Amino acid sequence: MATTMMIVFILCLFLSVSGFGVSSDNLATADDQHATETFDVERVDKGNENEFGQADVSSELVDEPMNELDHPEPGTPRKAKSSNSNRDVAGGSVYVRWGHTVCPDHSTLVYPGVAAGSHYNSGGGGANTLCVPHDPIYDRPAAGVGGLRAALYAVEYDIDRFPLRNDRMSHDVPCVVCEAPSRSAQLMVPGKNVCPTDDWTLEYGGYLMSERTHNIHTKSTFICVDRSMRMVSRTDGNARYRGSIALVESRCVSGGGGLPCSPYRDGYELTCAVCTK
């Protein structure tokens, strides 16, 4: 018996010296390791909890910068991102400055031109007023005046009994197409020569004008003409073939049917404003 115990003691001593011994520190199973990792994660999460007991993960959001489109500053122009590029592309609002030859300082020139429209007493044709450029390009035109055609004429000022601008009578109307590069919305305000709120930029103010009300005159769109009412040089004279624009007056009717007489004055020329943002 003593001999057997001695043999077992020698065998255990041999295994310990040879490195085949298994200590209690190395007996952790896979489950124990998983539990240890879970504890470490919970310890980290609890270390990042805020005062409401919620995990604070803001410190981990450092790889991806915030896009300015997600949370823009109030009043900051929004930029449209190109679908085929990571480069931000600024939007722009395009408008016509009627009755002028240059764009405002905060806008850029697209092209200058002259106002054009249908003949003032001819049926058919377009109802809108166009700003046509000074340098047209034709594509294989047919010589001669065609029968089945619409005609386009220069538009003249048709103004009388308005001392501020009587000298513009019968002169052609210039125009210029402008772009506000950092602003994407455009608004024409009839009846006011200022913008609705401070976050709009006033491009120009002036007078509301259109073809005048008369039984031989055709309808046209209302446009906002710059207060200065610039003229095309050497166009004085009542042309036979022309379009025309006249000042627009408010008509109020106390019994209803017209504009409300409290804010609007009967016979007053209406102002206007072109605004962007």
Image (cartoon, helix red, strand yellow):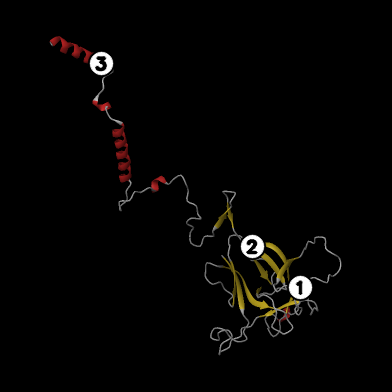
Looking at numbered disc 3 in the image, what kind of residue is underneath it?
Leu
Alpha carbon separation for disc pair 2 and 3:
90 Å
Q: Which mark is residue 179?
A: 2
**Does residue 101 show up?**
no
Alpha carbon separation for disc pair 2 and 1:
24 Å
Relative to 155, 50 lies left or right: left
Looking at numbered disc 1 in the image, what kind of residue is underneath it?
Ala
Nearest the viewer among 24 and 250 is: 24
Point out the tag, 3 or 1, that comes first from the N-terminus. 3
Expressed as whole percent of the image width and height from the top left, the position of residue 155 reads 74, 74
Marks 3 & 1, CB-CB < 8 Å contact? no
Expressed as whole percent of the image width and height from the top left, the position of residue 58 reads 39, 48
- Establish if 72 lies above or below 270: above
**Does residue 78 show up?**
yes
Where does the C terminus fall, quadrant-wise? bottom right
Q: Residue at x 64, y 62 (%)?
A: 179
Marks 2 & 1, CB-CB < 8 Å contact? no
Looking at numbered disc 2 in the image, what kind of residue is underneath it?
Glu
Alpha carbon separation for disc pair 3 and 1:
111 Å
- Residue wearing tag 1: 154
- Residue wearing tag 3: 15
Point out the tag, 2 or 3, that comes first from the N-terminus. 3
Determine whether the residue tagged by mark 2 lies in a helix, strand or loop: strand
Q: Nearer the viewer, mark 2 or mark 3?
A: 3
Q: Nearer the viewer, mark 2 or mark 1?
A: 1
Q: Which mark is residue 198?
A: none
Point out the tag, 2 or 1, that comes first from the N-terminus. 1
Q: Residue at x 27, y 26 (%)?
A: 26
Determine whether the residue tagged by mark 1 lies in a helix, strand or loop: strand
Q: Nearer the viewer, mark 3 or mark 1?
A: 3
Determine whether the residue tagged by mark 3 lies in a helix, strand or loop: helix
